Image: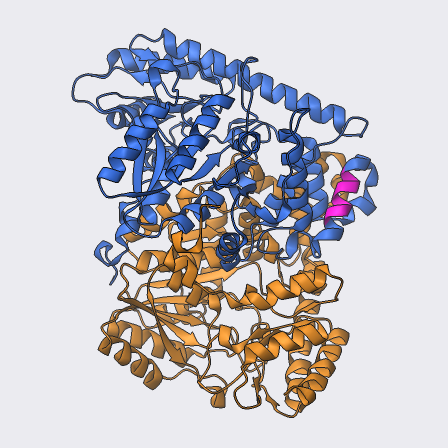
Chain colours: A orange, B blue
Amino acid sequence: MSLSLSDLSQEVLATQYAVRGPIVTRARELERSGKAIIYCNIGNPQALGQKPLSYVRQTLALMQYPELALRNPQAFPPDVLERAAELLKSSGGGLGAYSESKGLRIVREAVARFIAKRDSDGSLTLGADPESIYLTDGASKGVQSVLRLLIASDRDGIMIPIPQYPLYSASITLYGGRQVGYYLDESSGWSLSRQELERAHARAVAEGVTVKAICVINPGNPTGAVLDRDNIAMVIAFAKEHGLSILADEVYQQNIYRPEDKFVSFARVLAELGDTDVCLFSFHSCSKGFHGECGQRGGYLEARNVSSEVMAQITKLQSIALCANLSGQVLVYLMVRPPEPGEASFDLYEKEKREILGELAARARLLAEGLNRIPGYSCAPITGAMYAYPRIKLPFGRSDSEYCLALLEETGICLVPGEGFGQVEGSAHFRTTILPPREQLHQVLEKLENFHRRWR
Amino acid sequence: MSLSLSDLSQEVLATQYAVRGPIVTRARELERSGKAIIYCNIGNPQALGQKPLSYVRQTLALMQYPELALRNPQAFPPDVLERAAELLKSSGGGLGAYSESKGLRIVREAVARFIAKRDSDGSLTLGADPESIYLTDGASKGVQSVLRLLIASDRDGIMIPIPQYPLYSASITLYGGRQVGYYLDESSGWSLSRQELERAHARAVAEGVTVKAICVINPGNPTGAVLDRDNIAMVIAFAKEHGLSILADEVYQQNIYRPEDKFVSFARVLAELGDTDVCLFSFHSCSKGFHGECGQRGGYLEARNVSSEVMAQITKLQSIALCANLSGQVLVYLMVRPPEPGEASFDLYEKEKREILGELAARARLLAEGLNRIPGYSCAPITGAMYAYPRIKLPFGRSDSEYCLALLEETGICLVPGEGFGQVEGSAHFRTTILPPREQLHQVLEKLENFHRRWR
């Protein structure tokens, strides 16, 4: 075997992706040897029993095999038949043909309408341009394209929250850039302050780093914190002052669990401020929300205040692997174009949506309360996204990676240690999803408590 | 707008991907302004009217909406119902859940059986290991992962054929490596000689390049040439002598049109030679062959003679964007596990397959003959893949890029100029697919001839 690690790209070797790191590899091994594993490491709702939406799957089934519409039209509601027909007509080859590199125009137009509707109200009308929208294989690929574009040298830095979703740290390392971490404040519900952003930026600049962009995850992963309008305006002002682009990871925009919280998009606040300077890249996905269609890899990226010559570079990056998968593209369409009141699928869709979101909210409460009852654990309220990120007290000198590995071996519960997300030095955490069904969540909590009492 | 081209990655800016370059962008513009475009630039069969296979689409429709099996079992053949049931059972969440980073184990096992069966005969039994197989979003992503891994510095070179498929040149530029071109000999049907490989290698070494790997496309894209066993053994011997890895792009393995030609895989010849030294990465796809399922982005990568620590790096790269899309993964399964004799779908599947491949062979003949009848054109026989790559005589000082652009403006025919694939200096070519229906091919040929007579 003539190829050894020393022959390989140093950037690849240095890259780490904890959500699927060594603990998950070990879990797969244990599973193959017969141990029952509860995968709490990843936000993968349908692997934990969440059902897909009928409207979505009926349309995709028709797209795969349009003959069904002739053979069994009565098996499909009329609005589903209509959606499938219009998608087949305007895609020029259905699911089997490459689309334009940016993705099907009909889908990008629907995304533009969705953004405009989501972000407009009596006080402000926001538009969106289908040519600034790119359909991607999940949000991850969109994030990677933008980071790839922005990192031009090993002095280029990207600001990321600590704790962060490891897609960011992994991709920045892979593209040879520098992570510039800014800390979220656990003691005030993982809040974000201008002071901390300035501290992190100044320190990076002092080290000779050219800071290019700031990534914000809202609602937060793994923290679950929901940013309000003023927070977002603060980030935009900060970015403007320092000439940074903003990457707004908004994939959990539907996962907000308290009535007092509300999703506010970066696009909306940018428009309120009338800013035409700050480049904004925002990301959305079909994998989260109430769809949970992780395996179908649907997502989009929207660019604002970005010149057409810069956008052409994104198009080129997309074009090399031709286009995002078409089922994912269609899923984006169905996500941004749900059945409307009066359409045949409307009632069922609303019912399925309500049940999923209601269940997620209940599990978020149950999990946070349960974690806080375990002596040695403390968990901020889970106000958004799909995770708990409790702080845990460990014996002196022990790491959360060791903890999570030992927990896996003993109980079969697969978590991601805090080391994968980043944390204040000396603290220890893990990330777990809120997704297991309630009965299983109770078991998880019980096992965690028993394990934690005894682990030394 | 604070972001300008000078802020961006130089590698991204330098990257070119001709198959979807400026000519295609112009074609889209013309199309939106009402001009009828014939897209001959890309191997996208279903966009040009090729029908998907019933077996494949029925199974995927069931995977999307399993309730169909309860509501209308009679709409599906029993083998389709069975395949969908086993895939749903073993995928732990169906199309909606992330799979393992490498892809669903059931699919990788089926790929391993497919390779073993394809490459074994009375004289040799070849095995394949599911753990060395990675499911990818089309073959392109697999090629990109391996190139990403291998290119460790800007002195690292990758040998690619000239002409080549621009995925290779684009990705090598993007990852900051060096292209080391070796010429295929047009005068002898685009053949590949050891002498030319040695020349190219020696020249690169003299320039201070560390050559890491050689890419071979078999059957050739854009050339259509089919390598025989001795050719492949020669490449392996060359790679062994110089310590190179091999990237074998075998996505057109089903697209061979003359009875005297036969697809021989690099894996087979490696096994015949008993070689355990040369690292081989081979690629296959659902986008070509007779499936033509480009939009579904299914493909796989198989590694041979590659250590588990190197493979773990590929797994990590895959894991950052979680996994390949599940419809594509299922498509790979269906491609490598067609209906067997005696199963309900067998006859229809064989009929559809025969018709598609027969039609492609007829179009390949028709196109090559037609191109050779045009004064100033000469085209090698199209023995494999999906393209013609004719040599064209142009007025002194004019490029094939200018030619293709003028042709597009006048006739609406969208081709890719030879400059995008590489060619002997002073020669001019274009690539066109064989995919338009025969009637349309006749029109294309007529328009090309008229245009060529007049263009100055």
In this view, the residue in front, B48 or B392, is: B392
Tally of numbered discs: 0
Residue A164 % position (x, y): 46, 73
Q: Residue at x 39, y 35 (%)?
A: B241
Q: Name the side, left or right, on which A218 lies relative to B431.
A: right
Q: Name the side, left or right, on which A444 lies relative to B388.
A: right
The range drawn in magenta is B80-87
Residue B184 % position (x, y): 35, 23
Q: Is residue B86 magenta?
A: yes
Residue A191 % position (x, y): 45, 84
Asked where in the image residue A289 lies, by quadrant, the reply is bottom right
Q: Residue at x 19, y 16 (%)?
A: B395
Please determine whether, in this image, residue B348 is positioned above or below residue A50.
above
Asked where in the image residue B353 lies, by quadrant, the reply is top right
Does residue A367 appear in the picture of this structure?
yes
Q: Is residue B424 magenta?
A: no
Magenta span main SS: helix
Farthest-out residue, bottom? A375
Q: Residue at x 80, y 30 (%)?
A: B343
Please determine whether, in this image, residue B388 is positioned above or below residue A233.
above
Farthest-out residue, left? B397
In this view, the residue in front, B331 or A206, is: A206
Does residue A219 appear in the picture of this structure?
no
In the picture, which quadrant includes the C terminus of chain A? bottom right
In this view, the residue in front, B200 or B137, is: B200
Please determine whether, in this image, residue B185 is positioned above or below residue A46.
above
